[in-house]
Image: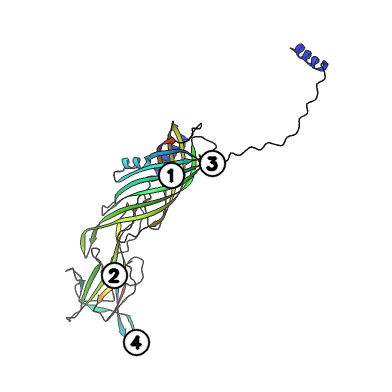
Amino acid sequence: MKRLVFISFLMAYLCSSCNDCTPEVNPGTGLLVAFYSFNAEEKKYEQSNIDLAQVGGIANPQLLISRDTLLNKLALPLSEFADTTAFYFSYPESDEMDTLCVSYKRKVQVNSPDCFSYTEFSDVQIISSSFDSVFMESNIIDNDTLQKNNVQIFY
Amino acid sequence: MWVLASGIGLAQQTGAPQPEKTVEPTAPQKKLKEPFHWEINSVGLGVDLAPLVLTSLNDQVTRYEAYTDLLLSRTWLVSAAYGRHQTQRADRAQTFDYESKGSYLRFGIDYNFLRKASKTDMITLGLRYAHATFDHAGTSLIDSSYWGGGELHTQVNGVSANIVELAGGIQVNLFRHFYLGSSFRFMILASVSDSPTLNVADIPEYGPRKEGNSTRMGYNFFVMYRLPIGPRKPGN
């Protein structure tokens, strides 16, 4: 019986040294925005290219897009240091500017205690927008596996 | 020798006739079952050596546990334990630090399968319930290509967890009233309170927690003094 106690202790000690690190995907920080315009022939809105001159975060002098670009989809990086992020969009040969401001919940996810961590964004809400219309398609950020866009912008 | 034996045989044959003994048939005697009565046999006080060994080998983990139990009618062990737990961890790339600090209370009841076979040693199986309260914090090194880099510190206090356990163990008498015991515990993380900004990664009593997995094995290796109570009986 005494031997059994010591053997169990050795078994427990050997098992406790097992590594518990497992690989896991990082869902990323990008808010996926898709642009839609009205197709008069088909009489419906469809995803289409928008001509943008500059795109950037309002609190950041660095630009995400700095020259005329045609695109129908864009990933806007959310800040991990704040609960809201605002972006501006300017157009070529125009003084007009549109803005989009979103709020979200951040949670630091520990993959496993010995491995890396990442920030998980959820409950994304549109606080304000100057576009014609915006629609929240998905309020979680998952750049790896989610096939949906987060926000649809109608212009 | 042969002559002596023959002589005895002759004497028996020639002696007075013995009356035949008649054996009356009797009903097979039922072994009387001892009536079970409740009594407190002993109080045990001990410390868990497994966390102490872990603490001495790993400078990022500090754990202590004190243990007490009541042995009732040499059949039931009612136990309670109090422990403190502090864990600090960092990932391999040194981009994340995590710290969890708190305490736990654990109550349990065990059945002793050796109550008749041994006066001192025990093999037990039982159930435990543990409640842990703790604070935890994480510091992430953020390196965003657009928003820049920096440290993000997140702290959540007053988190609690409930753990249900199935435990099997043995206790052996070392000498006098000193006992050595070990037990394996299959732990089920029943619930964890909300921690809105930081995922709970390490829980006192339960240990490291993985997302999507709510079971884990635990181990105790304790030395204890068992103080006899009540009328002395052999072995108690």
Residue at mark 1 = B79
Judging depth in this view, the residue of B87 and B145 nearest the camera is: B87
Subunit ID for the residue under disc 4: A
- Sequence order check, earlier mark of 3 and 1: 3
The reply to whether dot 4 and dot 3 touch (C-beta < 8 Å) is: no
Distance from disc 4 to disc 1, alpha carbons, whole Å, reads 74 Å
Q: Circle 2 — which element?
A: strand
Residue at mark 4 = A43
Q: Are tags 4 and 3 found on a single chain?
A: no
Q: Amino acid at mark 1?
A: Ser
Subunit ID for the residue under disc 1: B
Q: Locate residue B167, reporting x and y percent.
A: 46, 46
Q: Amino acid at mark 4?
A: Lys
Residue at mark 3 = B37
- Sequence order check, earlier mark of 4 and 2: 2
* Crowd rating for badge 4 (residues with CA inside 10 Å; few <14, some 14–19, many 20+): few
Q: Locate residue A139, reporting x and y percent.
A: 33, 70
The reply to whether dot 4 and dot 2 touch (C-beta < 8 Å) is: no
Q: Circle 4 — which element?
A: loop
